[in-house]
Image (cartoon, rainbow, N blue to C red):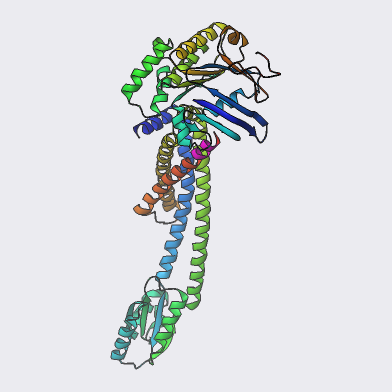
Amino acid sequence: MIRFTRVSKSYPKTGTAVHDVSLQVNKGEFVFLTGASGAGKSTLLKMIYMEERPTTGEVRVAGTSSVNATSRDVAKLRRKLGIVFQDFRLLEHRTIEQNVGFALEVIGASAAVIGGKVARVLTQVGLAAKGRALPRELSGGEQQRAAIARALVNDPFALIADEPTGNLDDRATRGIFQLLREINAQGTSIIMATHNLELIRRNEFRTIEMARGQVVFDSAEPALPGTRTP
Amino acid sequence: MSRAIRDVLDDLRRTPLLSALSVTTIAFSLFALGLFGLVALNIRQALDKLEDRVEIRAFVAPGTTPEDVGQAAGDVASFPEVQSATIVTPEMALKRAQSELGEFRDVFEGAVLPGSIDVRLKPGQRDPATVKKVAERVKTFSFVDDVRYGEEWIEKLYRLRNIAGIAGLVLGFAFAIVSVIIIGATIRMAVLARSREISIMRLVGATDSYIRRPFLLEGFAKGVMGGLLALVLTWVAQTLINRYVIETVFFTTQVAVLGLLFGALIGLLGSAVSVGRHLRRV
């Protein structure tokens, strides 16, 4: 479903961000992606939703290959993925309902479809009563729930979450993580980049650790010599 | 398309100051272009009026029969370059001189002026080379004493006309380029103001053409509004010039509509370039 084959990514100014990574994420998996800042986690995630293309190697996501995907293919791929960021990325002048509906609006869904789906996902993330609020009227945890609702509204097969709890306190972190677990339990793959080792230790999900652009630990693979448990 | 229209209206409502600034900038760029166009138009009109006075006067030798003169005038009138050939008898020449030079009326008392065939050329055939060619042909009639056509001033007029034409083209092009750059920068500000929205649209799977649409529509609308404002400003300027400085002419309806379309086109192109560059970068 998501496959990296000998993927490297380098930038002219900052050098190599990802080096020779090969891995696969299967349907329904929950994967923690961890590592220090600058280890290459975000670049790896960006290559999944094809914000970045590999310098060498291939990323293949639900049949779309980084080698030959057009901008239209990428747009179509993103409709099948949910993407969540640490800074929520909500539109400040739109209500929560409108923010969530925005993901359906841009793909040309009708008002009736948008209304029904938005109500469903807002209930799922626990924000049914706050649909008319503006983002600034919500707490950080609630804003992240709204961002997750927007990511879920298209029924994605995978949810890419780049440090989704990075800006949240412990209580909100637990709430968001619980929500992600529930989403995963319904069959959606989750790939979550996080620095929160406590969260990783308390949960038995697959963990991939990166350092200097390389995968140094993958709990799904036999331990490599010189690697360690995160 | 309805979504794009709604987005444009939303944006105009949300950022009225920026939108007003865009429209004003477009308007003033086009106003500068319009003023220049007005000056060029009026210089051209003045030159056309001067050119309209280009005339070949073939003086007829005394004693030539009216039949010969009439025959010659008919021949000359059939030249492809000629618009009209008018016979001026000595009596008519005297009357004309007396009316044109009223203060020297007495000088002409009892004078005898030569008759002539006054030849006017068709528009587009009044350049020095054609005038000279026709004058030389007219001169070949045996009873034609002399041919005058103000050779020197026709050449000066044409030189002036050519210079004005080239200067008009160069300056007009420069003005248009500057307008496009200013308008492009204005629209770029609008694009940058919505860059966050654009990046979110891309993340949720909007295609580039979907993202572009409202910006193109907005650029078009701002171009039309700016064009209208520029037209009004140019009209006001022309009215004031007419009242206080010199009588001038204004653009025809077709030219005014072309100006508006030019504004709309610039708005559209400026938007296309700005949003295209932005989409390539993000």
Q: In this view, does B48 lie to the left or right of A13?
A: left
Closest to the observer, A112 or A39: A39
Which residue sits at x=48%, y=78%?
A: B151
> Does residue A121 show up?
yes
| The magenta segment | B274-280
In the rendered image, residue A65, in percent from the top left (x then y), is placed at: 51, 33
Instruction: State whether the magenta stretch is mostly helix, strand or loop.
Output: helix
In the rendered image, residue A221, in percent from the top left (x then y), is placed at: 60, 18
Of all residues, the one furthest to the front in this rendering is A222
In the rendered image, residue A32, in percent from the top left (x then y), is placed at: 57, 16
Closest to the observer, A4 or A136: A4
Which quadrant of the structure image shows residue A227?
Answer: top right
Instruction: Decide: is A89 above or below B156.
Output: above
Q: Does the magenta stretch include residue B275?
A: yes
Q: Does the magenta stretch include residue B75?
A: no
Which residue sits at x=66%, y=13%?
A: A229
Could you tell me which quadrant the C terminus of chain A lies in? top right
Which residue sits at x=50%, y=74%?
A: B155
> Does residue A92 show up?
no
Which residue sits at x=31%, y=91%?
A: B68
